[in-house]
Amino acid sequence: MLFRCGAARSPSPSASRLDARPAVVIYPRLMDASSPLVIYVDADACPVKDEVYKVAQRRGVRVVVVANSFIAVPREPWIERIIVGAGLDVADDWIAARAGPLSVVVTADVPLASRCVKAGAAVISPTGRAFTEASIGMALATRDLMTDLRAAGAITSGPKPFSARDRSSFLSALDLALVRLQRPR
């Protein structure tokens, strides 16, 4: 159940005190489409989309979900779904062209993270790892090394399963990035 600030609500006689409190409060002035802050989600295989929606709603930030094919998103005015054409890096190109200093990009794609960091965006992986100018070079080198080792057959296993700890780390990193971007300059 969602409520807008200032909206009057009279609980039904059978509602308990806990039911009478709104689960989430939306601040309409922050949900304004002209708000400069935006979260871009590289949505194909992103395990934290629901967490992005919750944090964005609480903080009053627009979300743009970008995918190569149809993906279900909540029907909210502050969430936009972009379906780009099929092809290698089409979604990445779309996000990189729009990312900037008032953006948070959520992606596990290290080359996309590098492009967005260079554009001045805050970039976070779904595991909560923040990519920065200081760390992106090492992340690219590690990615390239792992790709070469997999191609040579030296590594046959994939990444470790996504965990509750990863989810928690992501939530903390996203909240921190938004707090930093929303501070008055």
Image (cartoon, rainbow, N blue to C red):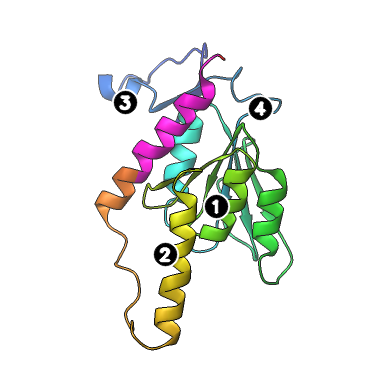
Q: In terms of sequence position, does the residue under pointer 2 or pointer 4 come before the other?
A: 4
Measured in 3D between alpha carbons, the distance from the residue under mark 2 to the one under mark 3, in whole angstroms, is: 49 Å
User: Which quarter of the rendering shows the C terminus?
Assistant: top right
Measured in 3D between alpha carbons, the distance from the residue under mark 3 to the one under mark 1, in whole angstroms, is: 42 Å
- Say which residue appears at 45% left-offset and 16% top-offset: 9
Label 2–label 4 contact, CB within 8 A: no
Q: Which residue is mark 2?
A: 142
Q: Secondary structure at mark 3?
A: helix
Q: Which residue is mark 3?
A: 19
Using the rendered image of the protein, determine whether residue 70 is visible from the camera's viewpoint. yes
Q: Secondary structure at mark 4?
A: loop
Q: Secondary structure at mark 2?
A: helix
Q: In terms of sequence position, does the residue under pointer 3 or pointer 1 come before the other?
A: 3
* In this picture, residue 7 sits left or right of residue 150: right
Q: Which residue is mark 4?
A: 36
Measured in 3D between alpha carbons, the distance from the residue under mark 1 to the one under mark 2, in whole angstroms, is: 14 Å
Measured in 3D between alpha carbons, the distance from the residue under mark 2 to the one under mark 4, in whole angstroms, is: 33 Å
The quadrant in which residue 30 appears is top right
* In this picture, residue 87 sits left or right of residue 165: right
| Camera-nearest label, 3 or 4 | 4
The front one of 118 and 99 is: 118
Magenta-colored segment: predominant secondary structure = helix
